[in-house]
Amino acid sequence: MEQPETVSTGDREITDLLLQLRDDRPGAMDRLFPLIYDQLRRIAHRQLQAEPSGHTLGTTGLVHETYLKLVDQTRVEWRDRGHFFRVSSMAMRRILVDYARRYRALRRGGGLERVPLDQADEAALAEREGHLLALEDALTRLTAVDERLSQVVECRYFGGLTEEETAEALGVSLRTVQRDWVKARGWLALELKG
């Protein structure tokens, strides 16, 4: 009796297209994008809900900006679907952090326009933007301590990947991801408190 196939046809097609993209075959990204669009939207939606930073970038805008970043990724050696979504979630995180930094710079006087008080909740926006930047700084420190813990956070928190998808993307066991996720959350909680 044959074993049931664990990789879906869609996952296999995505991996095949990623390999074509890695080999710089024309049109691979154009064929890949419709297959991954819904998953990228889910990741973007989770990231925007988890860390609203006061900017006007929506789910669709974040996906499209991510697409533009990914199209320029000529040096990435795409391995599989999990690796692609990990890189995508990292790209989205960078986009959101860049937006938060630009927002902070604008708040300090770089081209601000006067807005009536009833149209803006500046304190709430500043707090959310500050939280995202504090988390980014803490993740940078965590990377210096243990890069894999940081990668697990990127996959789980920013990418919205399941534990199984994270294990696949990082090439480690499910149990390792579960332990690392607990360690990383504890470490980040202490860092963000202090």
Image (spheres, helix red, strand yellow):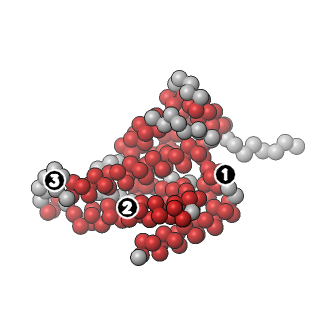
Q: Disc 1 residue type? A: Gly
Q: Residues within 10 Å of mark 1 (few under 14, many from 20)?
A: few
**In screen coordinates, is 105 left or right of 93?**
left
**In screen coordinates, is 1 left or right of 44?**
right
Inter-mark Cα distance, 3 to 1? 46 Å
Inter-mark Cα distance, 3 to 2? 21 Å
State which tag comes first along the sequence, 1 or 2: 2
- How many marks the image carries: the answer is 3
Instruction: Name the residue at 53% across, 23% down.
Output: 26
Q: Position of residue 48 (x, y in %)?
A: 39, 55
Secondary structure of the residue carrying tag 1 is loop
Residue ID for mark 2: 132
State which tag comes first along the sequence, 3 or 2: 3
Secondary structure of the residue carrying tag 2 is helix
Residue ID for mark 1: 171
Q: Name the residue nearer the viewer: 174 or 118.
A: 174
Dot label at residue 112? 3
**In screen coordinates, is 44 left or right of 111?**
right
